[in-house]
Amino acid sequence: MNDQGTVLTDADQRIWLDSFRIENQVNDTVSVIDKWTIRGGPGDGIDVVEIDNGRLCVSVLPTRGMGLWKARCDDLLLGWDSPVNRPVHPSLVRPGESGGAGWLGGFQELLARCGLAWHGPPGTDSADGRPLTLHGRIANLPAHRVTSGIADDGRLWVRGEVDETALFGPCLRLDSTVSTTPGSNRLTILDTVTNLAGTTADFEVLYHTNIGSPLLEPGSRLAAPTRRVIPTNAHAAVDIADWNLFAPPQAGYVEQCYFLELAADADGLAMIVLHDAEARHGVALEFPIASLPCFTLWKNTVATADGYVVGIEPSTDLPNPRDFERDKGRLMRLDPGETWSTHIDLVSLTSQSEVTEALDRVAAIHPATSAHLCDSPLPEYCSAG
């Protein structure tokens, strides 16, 4: 099968496949793409496309903005145990509830995009008076066109187009392809965002990548080619010395966030590694800092029942109020018809040797001893002290 693939959904052409399965064998590795639809419960009607390359299996949710539900590589599970126990259909999420934080009622994926017109906290955009809800709309919008297939070289892929549009408002399109090769521990996300409108549009996106148990445990660490670590508020500043060390679950823990200024390798790529206490298992994100220049670490080591999780989050700008990011010159803009593109590789590290190799790569980009830890929030980066 070539890159044209099979149309799983095309709202304009009245095409929708309730199920689809294709297999391919390369040497001794059997790869499978399996599309099915959740029935029953709050996820009723959500399409799932599972891509299994014989080693790495990931579940893509076209109905939820092409987010990643969960993944498994060898015996390592990636994702987290959210209090929201299963995917929630976008029609049941009420973004305006809870003071604009209703987005949290559907939040439980391994990777959920925040954006596209805005991300960050609820508020109001002073430029047009528009109310802004937590983390934007894209994670709760279904793809109108989805295709999938196995390329001639064995690569497995699923592609979705999601429109975030409004009359008298932003009109942006996400074109996302998720792919992997047989027997690999690496998943690639290739995203393009296009301004469909006739006027220039503000644009923001953050890749909210969430890791919980079993990878997250007491003593887990984050390694990053960090030039500077900035606590987002005074509460985070208290623990700046342990910014990349994770504690056991603690009831009542108050989340802490840190902004990281990252270095890149000769190809312009940064790599972030989160590993368990003994550095035997881990996960890495690799991405270009030219298109994703900002990074947030979200520590939420609450009680297990309340969502013990850490977020590793590359983004176009910081998750501050939109007005603040505009004033600081970090808010991106797209002219009519203009596109923005990026790619992110999610790499599962299932052995001590793979973790060590990834940590060596991070250290070669920028040694940890060179990181500057700020003892208080910086006004240029932090909207809250």
Image: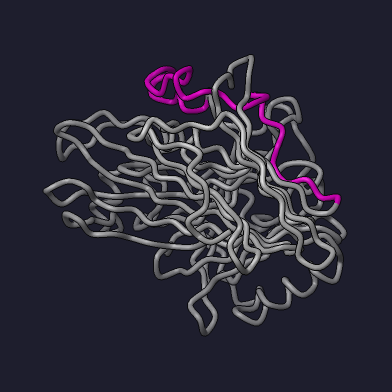
Closer to the camera in the image, 184 or 253: 184
- Name the residue located 44 percent from the left edge and 26 percent from the top edge: 101
Closer to the camera in the image, 106 or 155: 155
Where residue 162 sits, quadrant-wise, is: top left
Spot occupied by residue 108 in the image (x, y as percentages of width and height): 61, 32
Closer to the camera in the image, 44 or 294: 44
Residue 273 visible within the image: no
Spot occupied by residue 34 in the image (x, y as percentages of width and height): 67, 41
Residue 246 visible within the image: yes
Spot occupied by residue 173 in the image (x, y as percentages of width and height): 32, 46
- Name the residue located 68 percent from the left edge and 61 percent from the top edge: 347
Asked if 94 appears above or below 323 in the picture, the reply is above
State which region is magenta.
Answer: 75-104
Quarter of the figure that contains the C terminus: top left
Where residue 77 sits, quadrant-wise, is: top right
Spot occupied by residue 139 in the image (x, y as percentages of width and height): 46, 36
Closer to the camera in the image, 260 or 355: 355
- Name the residue located 34 percent from the left edge and 58 percent from the top edge: 380
Going by the image, does 6 lie left or right of 95? right
Where residue 182 sits, quadrant-wise, is: bottom right
* Colour pattern: one colour
